[in-house]
Amino acid sequence: MADHHPTGIKRWLFTTNHKDIGTMYLWFSFVMFIVGGSMAMVIRAELYQPGLQFVDPNTFNQMTTMHGLIMVFGAVMPSMVGLANWLIPMQIGAPDMALPRMNNWSFWILPFAFTLLLLSFTMPGGAPNFGWTFYAPLSTTYAPPSTDFFIFGVHMMGISSIMGAINVIVTVFNMRAPGMTLMKMPLFVWTWLITAFLLIMVMPVLAGAVTMMLTDRHFGTSFFDAAGGGDPVMFQHIFWFFGHPEVYIMILPAFGVVSEIIPAFSRKKLFGYASMVYATASIALLSFIVWAHHMFTVGMPVAGELFFMIATMLIAVPTGVKVFNWVATMWKGSLTFETPMLFSIAFVILFTIGGFSGVMLAMAPIDFQYHDTYFVVAHFHYVLFPGAIFGTTAAVYYWMPKWTGKKCNEKWGKWHFWLSMIFVNLTFFPMHFSGLAGMPRRIPDYNMMFAGFNELASIGAFGLGLVQILFLFIVIKTVRSGEKSEKKPWDGATGLEWDQIDTPAPYHTFDTPPKVS
Amino acid sequence: MAIRRKLFASIAMLMGFIFSTVAFASDLNMRPGVTETSIEAFDLHMQVIYVMTVIAIVVFGAMFYSFIFHRKSKNPKPATWSHSTKMEIIWTAIPVLILIYLTIPAIKLLLKMEESKTDADLTIQITGIQWKWEYMYPEQNITFISSLSTPRDQIDSGSDKGENYLLEVDNELVIPAGKTVRFLVTADDVIHSWWVPDLAVKKDAIPGFINEAWTHVPEDAIGTYRGQCTELCGKDHGFMPVVVKVVSQSDFDSWVAQKNEERIAAEKAAAEAAASSWELDKLMALGEEIYNGKGACFSCHKADGSGTPPLFPALKGSQMATQADQLNDHINIVVNGKSGTAMAAYGSQLTDAELAAVITYERNAWGNDTGDAIQPSQIQAFKAGN
Amino acid sequence: MSEQDLQQANKLLVKKLLAVVAGMFVFVYALIPLYDVFCDITGLNGKTRGKALYESVSVDDQREITIEFMTNVNRGMPWEFGSKTAKVKVHPGELNEVIFYAKNRSGEETIGQTVPSVSPGQAALYLNKTECFCFDKQVLQAGEYVDMPMKFYIDPDLPEEITHLTLSYKLYNITEAVNSATGATK
């Protein structure tokens, strides 16, 4: 009976089941990942060599803008929501999310919003071309007509995120099984709980920013127009007040994933659980007071620059604490290196490298030389790709048996991992150097002194792109005809979802709350 | 066991050494630049890299150690401990100390860079315009536009690229060595950013606001330094380089004198050109040259006049370029620009003869065929308000 | 807890969270005046304040401040605009006047708005204008020329280390904006 469910298209359109919705979010995010990734391929093709070969500069700007928007809002964020949907109820012993119908709407808004956003390519003037950070007045007075579609799309994505976050908070606060105290929850649930608070606080700020853009464009306001008494720099303050917490929104769930997987394959409990919770909360709190480190060259007074520099460097402390706790979890454990563990270990190493460039960027007087160059691009791709994306990939490999009853082929998984490792580093490590050499961001052509680094990065990118096809193949093959999994495919795995639920998980789980020890 | 650990440690140190050497290697590293601030910034940058390298060796070293010695086959029985308040305190305190160690020089350098200097020997206003820079020396009465001078065929058609591909301009910013120079950076349309890596000066150009930046290039650092716009500003963001030529004081004075002579000569030539009457052929020839060269009209309106609507309107067959009653509007938009768009005011960038020629070209090329032969004197009259 | 209790608890929490969402949205709009107030108090973005009064201000003969004036005309604005004086040396507390001029070179009535910006930003707080053409929009008929005086004094509390200021004005064409706002047709 627990497995009885509707079939056909209607199942997916009207489902209120957290597992179905989680599946839809994950597939949607993967499709968006491929779409955003294709744009990256266009970017890297153009940047493969000096000269303009494939696209004109305006089209290039559309590629960089849409690549960023789609990856941030269409790939990374929905993938995290997908994981939240699948895992949170099972991990806390709840039958479903607190607000299942709102959950359905949260998902279905997204395909609509992104269709609108992608249709902008067909409009006169083309798609948004002002960078995913859409600074005014480039994005207001000087922007193409499709900008209004972009604004509408952002509003919709924001509503979806806010509703999803509310759902997570209510579920975690009110629906834990008896005995599941907050400090007994798996760290993944903690990181998502904190992420959800970040979301409800900053998505409205983004909504406000784009609404001000809309009224500046069409209703005679001058929020960001100096002629009318406004200030373009104020846009940046508002945007980054959202934007900085946003990057933590994108990474905290991945921290949670890795905090589940590393203990499982170390056969040892997560080191310093309480510390990890406090560190995550500190990161979230600090994330609200560091936004202007994205704006050091804007002409801020020294006092501001000092404050933001110091606050930003401070975030390295709780982040470091987390890294040390992961290392301590592995230390004197009993390690095996299945695919989920490989991706999680790579996460720790490469995210830390991204953290190093982050500390460098935080130091204002040297940031003047790094700001808006490829050094920044290298930094954030390190924390996002081998960071957030590897985290999600690790999660897929780890929980795939629970979701589908089938194990991913270990040999193929390892190929996926090693090829990803090689190509992700080949793509993004050279960008540190092209940035240090002086190459600005968002340019379609460059001087020969940057050529070597760009060539390497492009080769890496093409390889990385192809590897995603391998991943797609692995997932599809597993779902259709993968090896059947035992109840606990990973002997070190712990948690309600592994101990008290069948593999695969039935359609309805925990209709009666489990016993929590 | 001890031998293995020693071996392990030495490999780690070797890697660290290689990494540091590689980091120092100039091709891979940021350049130290030529000013006191740029060199101090470079030194701080290297300091951070060394610290990060040590941290990486320790942390990754511990991880790799675990991979080898704590794998299941080597360590079948995992430890059972999972917390230690002492460790948490240690690995919170040590990073804090490291950060303090890094922050102190950073604060010192920041204060040094940003404190308001008292006396500037020279003040220059820098205005970012889509997609070129305007440099104005108020005290020397010099104003000029600095635009990319790399030939189009090097960009589009794959011809051999010069050494300063995309980093060369028609009119460089000239400053004297050994003097304190103050830059007042602003923009005319969207946000740009003016950056010269060798001077370690990067300041955003915000429309409607001025930002101050300072530099002092030592006397032994005479040379040419190249940078780029570093804030996405539209289509040709990657094509508006910054080139600063640092010369001796006497060479600077000569350059100032020369620029003033050029200005006077240009005014005289403009007056003469305005006085004479220009034939249609002569106007078309000059017009085409300006349209595809100095005026860079082709870069938005395309060589064939088709533009990229709606942002960059077509000129071929357009109302404004073909209707007699819109001639005044046509002249107005070229001379004064259009606010809220990328169409800048060319009235001060081109001479009256050049303006007359390019407008004539636009009204006759691509089948527009109005037969209009706009005279420089018409432009002069328009500018005077008649 | 029972199914009903759970639903009640959920609804209550949802309401609280929605209040947070609404609050943050209001906060963003509140940021606009807050930003202005912050910049007003600290002068941090180089924007000068509104009209000041010259009362009970003592002149500091010991200090001399150099002020440079710059003018820029935005595209689409067919006016000439400049200052008759490029640079002045003043004592803090002393009321001074600088004359600017503007001429409408076009054949139509045009409305302009000048926007001031001061560098260094912190000095903006101490530049008090008792009369300025930047307070109001300027309407000039075709071909009209006008002298525009600007009266100001530097607050004697100007920090010691600031001895040079630049006051830059940018002139924008706001004819269209004004006409569409007032519904006028020209």
Image: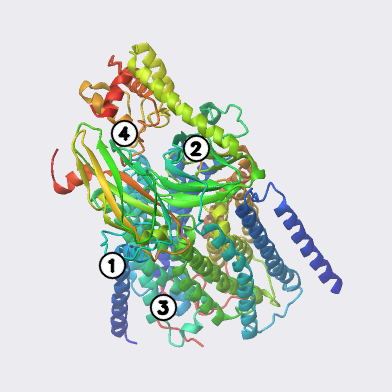
- Which residue is the site of mark 4? B336
Q: Relative to B179, is B139 on the left or the right?
A: left
Q: Residue C56: which disc?
A: 1
Residue B351 horizontal/vertical position (percent): 39, 25
- Of residues A201 and A329, the one drawn nearer to the viewer in this rendering: A201
Q: Amino acid at mark 3?
A: Val
- Of residues A334 and B22, the one drawn nearer to the viewer in this rendering: B22
Q: Residue A172: which disc?
A: 3
Element under disc 3: helix
Q: Relative to B198, is B265 on the left or the right?
A: left
Determine the CA span between mark 2 and mark 1.
54 Å
Give the chain of mark 1.
C
Q: Residue B239: which disc?
A: 2
Determine the CA span between mark 4 and mark 3.
61 Å
Say which quarter of the image contains residue A507: bottom left
Q: Amino acid at mark 2?
A: Phe
Same chain check for tags 1 and 4: no
- Of residues B321 and B358, the one drawn nearer to the viewer in this rendering: B358
Q: Amino acid at mark 4?
A: Asn
Say which quarter of the image contains residue B357: top left
Determine the CA span between mark 3 and mark 1.
63 Å
